[in-house]
Each structure stands twice: as structure tokens, then as C-alpha cells.
Amino acid sequence: MTTLKDVANRAGLSVSTVSYVLNGKKKVREDTYRRIMQAVEEVGYVPNQQARSLKTRSTLSIGVVVPDISNQFFPEIVKGIDDAANMDNYTIILCNTDNDAEREERCINALLSKDIDGIIYIGTAKSKAILQRKTELPIVLVDRKLGERYISVTTNNYQGGYMATEHLIHTGHSSIALITGPVFITTYFDRLRGYMDALNANSLHYSEELVFECDFTSKSGYDAAYRLCEQNVQVDAIFATNDLMALSIIRALLELGKKVPEDIAVVGYDDIYIASIVMPALTTIRQPKYEMGKKAAELLIKAIHKEEITQRQIEMTPTLIVRETT
């Protein structure tokens, strides 16, 4: 059976250096890291994870909770998480909850039972009480906020909501509907605030009958567009707070005989890949999804190692991407 010493001899490094790197306790130069990984592969070294876990009280595993893995927004975040985690020899355990609060609770409890080292949470925000039970476990939120006690990585959702609405106003629209995810989630509440303030800043009236709160799924956006048109309210633009809803809204509008953007303009949020290749291509607010995931993993690993984190609330900048639906 191969040992750490075999790896060290093949890499031409000390056993302690190899051990530190493989246990995620020390960062080295990229060329040194590659030498160690190549030596591991060449000698066929497989660490005894159970023994290592008992000795270090670490499993080198991170739980990741996402609400809907079929939404292209979340896999890009997970890719960033996985790449950053892999650089420090961590593996991720992915849990998809399908936006179901009970399933989310089961997922979190299952992760906690595996003695993971930390959790990256992109959830419904209904599991706050469960997360609080494990106060000693490092937790980082992505695209969500649950108070200042939690480390979080988001974009400025207020700015994004304001930017989307202002773009519609500046392109000549004055009756703008909002189709949003649940506003008890701070992400969507902040986008709603941005929408309201942009209307106010441009002397436009805010109307509750133009705001539709949905469950942020594709179907809910589709249904909301039909309800909006059935009300016979004069609308010349729609701001949807995620791209899945926006794309379904466009489909519904076309079925109803509306032209996009000639009759009704549409702006989405997230800039998932498909937004750029559909016809008409979707105007949207871009979030730096991969970078958000990468940053979240880096912060979580710092927290696991009890390193100082000077900025616990990271807020990245959204970008307006203008395409064919406005």
C-alpha cells in the first residue's frame, strides 16, 4: 500500500509539505501543487479518509443546497463553488430541494448527519431555524441574506431592480408590470424596492395590480402573464425577476397575440445562457454567477480554517445586458 512518503519521494518534497497540501492546511505555488498531484496519481496514493477524518475532525466535504438545479442560474454558481473547493482539496455534496421547504429541511439534516465541514446555502429562507441550531458550523449564503450573522455573497439586487426598471422607462415605457419571486426572500424584496424607487424617481405611479408574486418557476411566470392580460390593464412592459419566468412570459405573450417588444417589452434577471440564444434574445440583468460561487467557497473554507474574514457581506455589481426584447 502506498503512503505519503511514497508521494513525497516521487514529488521530491518533504512528507510534511505533502501532508499539509493534501489535508488542505497549506497553500503552495501552483507548480508545487501540480507536482504533488502528479505524484499522487503516479504512485496511486489513496488517503484513508475515515482515519484522516477521525484525526483532524474534518471530512474535507462541503454541503451545497440549491433550490432548482434545472434553472441554469444555479449550475453556474455550483461550478464556481466546485472549482474553488477543489483547489483546496474539498469535495461538494449537492442537494437539490425543488423549492420545497420540507425537502430542504430534510436535505440540511442529512448534510449535518454526515459531519460535513460547512454549508453553502441557496435556499427558500424557510430553513433559518435549522441552520441556527448548528451555530458552530460555518455557513455561507449565496444570492440570499438571512441577517448579518451569516456570511453572504450576493449582487446588489436593489440596484439591479432599479436598473431594469429605469431601462424600460428610458426606452419609452410608462406602464410596467413586475412579475417577481416570493418577496419574503430578500433577493426578490430588494428587486421590488428597486422597481418601486425607479418608478418614483421618474414620476410614475406604483400600482399593486401590476405586481404579481410567484414561486419563481417557469410555469408561474407563464401563468402570471396570462392573468395580467386577462385583467385588461394597459401594460407596455414587464420586468421579471428571473430569466426562467421572463422566457415563459414571452411565450405566453406570443400565444396571446402580443409582439415582443413592439407591444410589450420584457426584461429578465440573471442572464442564464439560454437568454442569449432564444429569439428574440432576452434583455436582462447579468449576475456574475460563477464568481459568486467561487467567492462563496473561498469564504467558507476560510471560515472552516478559522481565518479572519474582514468583509462578511459581499455584494457584487449587476450589469444591464440589452438585447432584442426591449
Image (cartoon, grey):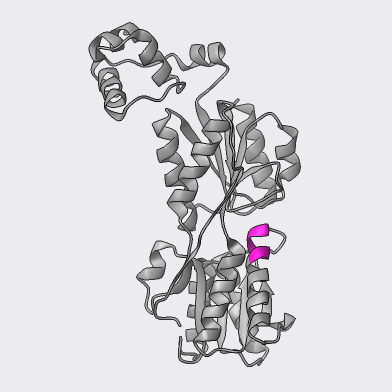
- Above-or-below relation of 164 to 272: below
Residue drawn 39% across the image and 79% down it: 280
Residue numbers of the magenta segment: 186-190
Residue drawn 50% across the image and 52% down it: 69
Direction from residue 230 to residue 46 in the image, left or right: left
- Above-or-below relation of 101 to 19: below
- Which percent across, then down, holds residue 10? 23, 12
Q: Which residue ends up furthest to the front in the rendered image?
A: 310
- Which percent across, then down, holds residue 321? 43, 71
Residue drawn 70% across the image and 64% down it: 183
Direction from residue 64 to residue 15 in the image, left or right: left
Residue drawn 49% across the image and 37% down it: 298
Q: Is residue 172 visible?
A: yes
Q: Is residue 75 visible?
A: no
In the rendered image, the quadrant that contains the C terminus is bottom left
- Which percent across, then down, holds residue 265? 50, 84
246 or 28, nearer to the observer: 28
- Magenta stretch encompasses residue 229: no
Q: Main secondary structure of the magenta part?
A: helix
111 or 272, nearer to the observer: 272
- Above-or-below relation of 60 to 227: above
- Which percent across, then down, holds residue 184? 72, 60
- Magenta stretch encompasses residue 188: yes
